[in-house]
Image: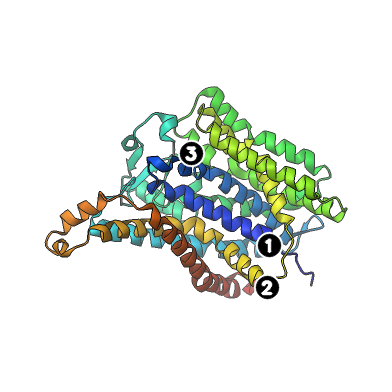
Amino acid sequence: MERKEHFIGLEWLRFLLAIYVVLFHTVHAYVNDGASWLADLTGVGFFATSSFFVLSGFLLAHVYCRDGAMREPARSFLGKRLANLYPLHLVSLLLTALVLAIIAKLGIPPDDAKASLRFVVYDTNEELAGASRDALEHFMDDRELALNFVLQLFMLQAWNPLYLTFNPPLWSISTLFFFYLTFPLLAPRLMRLRHKGWWLLAIGLLYLVPPLWVIHSQAYGIPYTGLLHRMPLLRLPEFLAGILLYGLFRRMRDGGQAPRGGTRLLLAGFVLACFAATVWLLKGERFWYFLLHNGLLLPAQLALVWLCALLATPRNGALVRWSQRLGTAALPLFVLHVPIFILFSRSEKLLGVLSAGCLENWAQCAQRAGEQPLALGLYPLYLGLTIVLCVVAQERAIVPVRTFLLRRVVLRGEV
């Protein structure tokens, strides 16, 4: 059996992309006016998510495509992907519901969202919409709650353009699931294309059409921000670009045309320059957000994945093992960091005011806890704890469940 190459650089990349998403969603709660630079540097979360989608297409093409065909039947591929995603999705839903229920029971006021499954946040940017936070919050009625439950249960929530739900990052799992459904149909055809570079350019230009239409129409509000943000069909070009990128990477490397040291430095400089320009442009005209979010940064994301794929595997066995452990923990980091953050931040606030008087007047104690600021010095503790919990969850919970599903359900019909 052919042994597949292991890209250690891509393992580290997906771990670091997940860490950046964690920072993007949580560090703002710790940042004060004196650390606005930190908020700026961690405020480009969509760069990490889009890079992750490109990386997913690249890796899946490497693992499952050979000579322009699937290495295994589509049923087997989809079964493996579902067994990898769905247990994690359910764990995240259950953990979020449990954490929100505990916080609501304690009565600690939240920072920026209601501690209830019925409260959601409209998917639009306050600065773009010119609206207050209260105007962007929405209380779901019974029908909306039931519909949201069904969408979440079947990993279809990314198709809802109106609002983000109680664990917003889960939309990325829903979008990935759609990408996986398209892979057996589209990936072999893309890998057989002759002029992959031109097709990659065409996909990049096509990707820019929706945000250009939104800008031309000045349709900056709901539901268009939700459509651009996470609609699977509109985000599909990133995944397809990753597949084409692998085809180019494989052809050039097999032909002895891999970029040398000088070219690699230029590519790295290009990625850093694009990221710095993004941080700066997001402070300007609002149309930049839509262009950067949907397509304008795709060349930089492709360059980043290419560069990391070129990194050689070190001889240090421990380093290789840790790259694999942290790389496989990337998806848990994406979807579990929000409930962990809610629990950690509320615990930090509560410990700051906890005293014997809390036993006599818990409501007043909980109210005081909600008014406590978070200490930036404790943020590394949250980050480290989140990494450890996600590694443990992946290895002790997700992997055993996935293995069970593969043996008893997915691969049973192939034996």
Q: In x, y percent, where is residue 106?
A: 24, 59
**Callout 2 amino acid:** Gly
For the N terminus, the image quarter is bottom right
Classify mark 3: helix, strand or loop: helix
Please say if the residues under marks 2 and 3 sit with CB atoms less than 8 Å apart.
Answer: no
Q: In x, y percent, where is residue 319?
A: 64, 68
Classed neighbour count for the residue bearing mark 2: other residues with Cα under 10 Å, few (<14), some (14–19), many (≥20): few
Residue 73 sits in quarter: bottom right
Of callouts 2 and 3, which one flags the residue occurring earlier in the amino acid sequence?
Answer: 3
Q: Nearer the viewer, residue 73 or 128?
A: 128
Classed neighbour count for the residue bearing mark 1: other residues with Cα under 10 Å, few (<14), some (14–19), many (≥20): many
Residue at position x 20%, y 52% in the image: 367
Q: Which mark is residue 8?
A: 1
| Mark 2 lies on residue | 317
Residue at position x 79%, y 46% in the image: 262
Q: Is residue 20 left or right of residue 254?
A: left
Residue 392 vs 299, above or below: the answer is: below
Of callouts 1 and 3, which one flags the residue occurring earlier in the amino acid sequence?
Answer: 1
Marks 2/1: CA distance?
12 Å
Please identify, in this view, whether the residue under mark 2 or under mark 1 is nearer the observer. Answer: 2
For the C terminus, the image quarter is bottom right
The residue lying furthest to the left in this view is 360
Marks 1/3: CA distance?
34 Å
Residue at position x 59%, y 35% in the image: 277
| Mark 3 lies on residue | 226
